[in-house]
Image (spheres, rainbow, N blue to C red):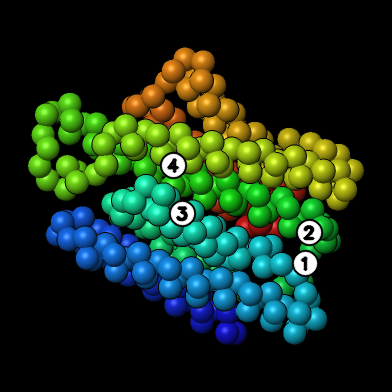
Amino acid sequence: MSNVILFNLTTFLFGVASALYLGALYAKNENIAVAGTWVCVLAAVVSTAALGMRWYESYQMGIGRIPVTNLYESLVFFAWSVNLFYLVVERKYRNRTFGAFVMPIAFFTMVFAVYNDSSIQPLVPALQSYWLHAHVITCFVGYAAFAVSAGVALMYLLKARQEEAKISKGVVGLLPPTKTLDDLVYRAIIWGFPFLTVGIITGAAWANYAWGTYWSWDPKETWSLIVWLVYALFLHARVTRGWHGRRAAIISIVGFLATIMCYLGVNLVLSGLHSYGGS
């Protein structure tokens, strides 16, 4: 199928972009980083075309559905979201070092997608609802924001450790100031949290439509609540306790690990009403 060829090309481009950003960091060469940006832009175009092509091909097959309904499609959509969110961050903060920590997330997500079934299958009855669009898209936009936040949080921890040692040389010395990194960790979560909240609400409405109950403590629902509580804790501690810096960065990374468990761990390890998400 044409869409799979385009997605494979996207995987290659994400790998090239990751290598360029990492190479630029170690070589201290801005021109290499600029090339990484243009590869990311090209990857955004190719992956968007791939999503559109997959949607079109599903109609040609008489299925006609949005391409976010199985594990392969959710992985490529997540990587697509991470890339676009990263490009917005790079433009706003005018700093390309973020790419060395964020783009590998998109690349390895696509590599994982390659090893999953890429065929277009009809929707199972539980997925035949318009709630699908709002629920899945909002959740994955939130996940993308959390991925960027976690990548920047890792940068913060490295930079803070170097500053404590009063060392300014080396690769870590090229990273933005800790204040900038701390601010981006916070702003990415501020952006992603409302999307996750809407995703959970629309998921509950969809569950009531499909299964006759808003909440059934299914493993996916439980882990979604855990993820929401971790980021709610982050925002509460930030606003009421003034938590910044290392503690905020650690919570951001813990939140993203919980997000991975909610997204992949539940689908691949646990069984429940959302088990179709692991195929």
> SS of the residue at dot 1?
loop
Quadrant for the N terminus in the image: bottom right
Which residue in the protein does label 2 denote? 127
Where is residue 265? Give x, y as percent. Answer: 55, 47
Q: Image quadrant of residue 78?
A: bottom right
Residue designated by label 1: 123
Residue 91 vs residue 272, the one in the foreground = 91
Label 4, residues with CA under 10 Å away: few <14, some 14-19, many ≥20:
many
Residue that label 4 marks: 149
Q: Nearer the viewer, mark 4 or mark 3?
A: 3
Whether 277 is drawn above or below 199: the answer is below
Which of discs 2 and 4 lies nearer the camera? The answer is: 4
Sequence-first tag of 4 and 3: 3
Name which residue type carries label 4. Answer: Ser
Earlier sequence position, callout 4 versus callout 1: 1
> From the image, which quarter does the C terminus lie in?
bottom right
* Kind of residue at badge 2: Leu
Q: Are marks 1 and 2 in contact (CB under 8 Å)?
A: yes
Distance from the alpha carbon under mark 1 to that under mark 3: 33 Å
Occupied quadrant, residue 168: top left
